[in-house]
Amino acid sequence: MAEDGDAAAPTTTTQEPQEAMDYLKALKAVLKKALKHDGLARGLRESVKALDRKDAHLCVLAESCNEPAYKRLVEALCHEHKVNLLTVEDGKELGVWAGLGKFDKEGNSKPKHPGASVVVVRDFGEPSAELDFLLEHIKKSKQ
């Protein structure tokens, strides 16, 4: 009778397909989770403070930032404090991912939403498959 109970236990594991996940999707999920845990510094002022305090785990810089001095400052601070730096193309998209945009009841972003030139992750929150994938992507890109 005990053997029947052991055999009835499901042993299936759920794995997400790796081909469906790219680093932008993983980054979006990691930023969303960090936002829930109050672990994001958004904008230049907050991000620079977090980088100076050595509070940062990951920095995301928008390539669409039109001020080269901002880019040089963030890149230099990341290099000095050995913080991983990722770049994304659009600052408006980064702002929405960081929670700066306004959303309607269905969860769609409204047309007017501010962008962010830099976002720093201070706390990843709970571990996830997306975080593992993103850290692995960063490790591979450094080599």
Image: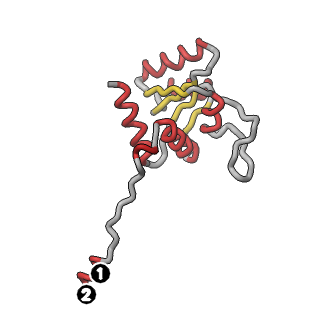
For the C terminus, the image quarter is: top left
Q: Residue at x 34, y 64 (%)?
A: 12
Whether residue 126 is visible: yes
Cα–Cα span, label 2 and label 1: 7 Å
Q: Is residue 141 left or right of residue 106?
A: left
Q: Nearer the viewer, residue 106 or 44?
A: 106
Circle 1 residues within 10 Å: few <14, some 14–19, many ≥20: few
Residue at the disc numbered 2: 1
- Element at label 2: loop
Q: Secondary structure at mark 1?
A: helix
Asked if residue 10 lies left or right of residue 46, the reply is left
Q: What residue is at 59 percent from the left and 16 percent from the top?
A: 70
Compared with 4, 87 (above or below) is: above
Residue 68: x %, y % from top left = 59, 12
Asked if residue 77 is positioned above or below residue 113 in the image, the reply reads above
Residue type indicated by callout 1: Gly
Asked if disc 2 and disc 1 are in contact, CB closer than 8 Å, the reply is yes
Position of residue 71 measured from the top left corner of the image (x, y, whole percent): 56, 17
Q: Residue at x 60, y 32 (%)?
A: 94
The disc at residue 27 is none
State the residue at coordinates (34%, 70%): 10
- Residue ID for mark 1: 5
